[in-house]
Image: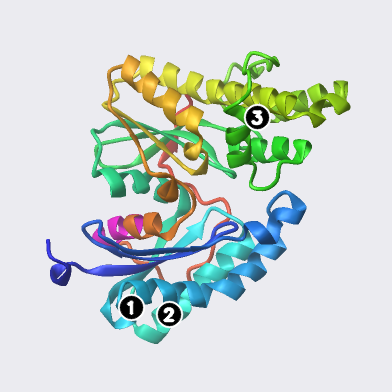
Amino acid sequence: MSKTSERFLLAIESSCDDTGAAVIGEYGTILSNVVASQDKDHKPFHGVVPEIASRAHVRDIADVCQKALDQANMTLKHMAGIAVTSGPGLIGSLLVGVNFAKGLAISSGLPLISVNHIRGHVRAIFLEHGTPPLPALALITSGGHSHLFSVDEQEELDLLVKTRDDAAGEAFDKLSKMLGLGFPGGPQIDRMAQSGDYRRFHFRQPKISDGSLDFSFSGYKTAALRHIESDPSAFKTQQNQSDLCASFQHALVRHLLDRVGIALNHGHWRSLLLGGGVACNSALRAQAAHLADSHQVPFFVSQPKLCTDNAAMIGAEGWAQFKRDKKAALSLAPEVKAKAYRQYTPLR
């Protein structure tokens, strides 16, 4: 399909700590995908500070949207609509993106499309690979979310497993802070783990008293702290840090994929999908691919720049909503705990 016959959306993403804007075509063409990182803003605090994130979005959003349009060699007059993340996320961050998008929609007369951030992570896989064989299992895991979904033939999500406490990405950030490795923690842990022995330190797999198979990551942080506190001077050496990172990463990946393996054994899934920022982790990508291969189902994961928070995935999901005539009112308000799924059918 030629560029001239394809319609385009301007998409905006500001759910947490990165400001994103993209111009996305209805057939999956990515003309631009601009992200303004806030890593330097949050690095001194070893984690995302909501108030700082909100102010940084205010600082960056107009410039990021203009860059996205400039890179696409287009203006708002060429757009069919404005797609924006309305939740879940940090309330201050969401407010900046939603209100900016509403302003653009009012001034241009373009329709406004509300997009769920987590559905955007699932859609990123469709954006890069096309529609995978359905029904599929989708593991979406990041700094704020860890969920296992079923995706049916109508592309509706049902939640199978959720986290009881922290998300996997948050656990990586906390270990990185303990070891003084920097922020964001996920890439640092992955890098250190490459030269570490994952058998060196033991991490017990969590068991939830009610028999649930929900994820739980808070215990891993506590166990890591206990290892460090047992001999703080020892963890000033790079090898001990690498061994702890490797052991920690191995335990978290095993915990995530144990649930995926159980689901694969109890359903007729035609593919396995992996998305979200933690999907950049090399061990998770490799072991998820191996698990899918052992169950003889195809495996789909996006390239890293589409796994982390970005507006291209929001635009892709925006088109799915637009084509279903799901347009938002200008009274649209952010929803911090917006649900991406139709129903919760816990895996047991």
Do the residues under discs 3 and 1 have CB atoms within 8 angstroms? no
Do the residues under discs 2 and 1 have CB atoms within 8 angstroms? yes
Q: Residue at x 35, y 72 (%)?
A: 71
Q: What is the x, y in percent for residue 84?
A: 44, 65
Image-quadrant location for residue 43: bottom right
Type of residue at label 1? Leu
Q: Which residues are magenta?
A: 317-324
Q: Residue at x 48, y 32 (%)?
A: 282
Number of residues whose C-alpha sits closer than 10 Å to that of mark 1, classed few (under 14), some (14–19) or many (20 or more): some
Type of residue at label 2? Leu
Q: CA distance from mark 2 to mark 1?
A: 8 Å
Left/right of residue 296 with respect to residue 12 in the rendered view: left
| Residue 120 numbered mark, or none | none
In the figure, 136 relative to 110: above or below?
above
Q: Residue at x 48, y 47 (%)?
A: 339
Most prominent secondary structure in the magenta stretch? helix
> Quick one: 206 or 129, which is closer to the camera?
129
* Pointer 1 residue: 110
* Pointer 2 residue: 104
Q: What is the x, y in percent for residue 280?
A: 48, 39
Q: What is the x, y in percent for residue 269?
A: 30, 24
Which sits earlier in the primary sequence, circle 2 or circle 1? 2
Number of residues whose C-alpha sits closer than 10 Å to that of mark 2, classed few (under 14), some (14–19) or many (20 or more): some
* Pointer 3 residue: 217
Evaluate whether residue 330 shows in this view: no
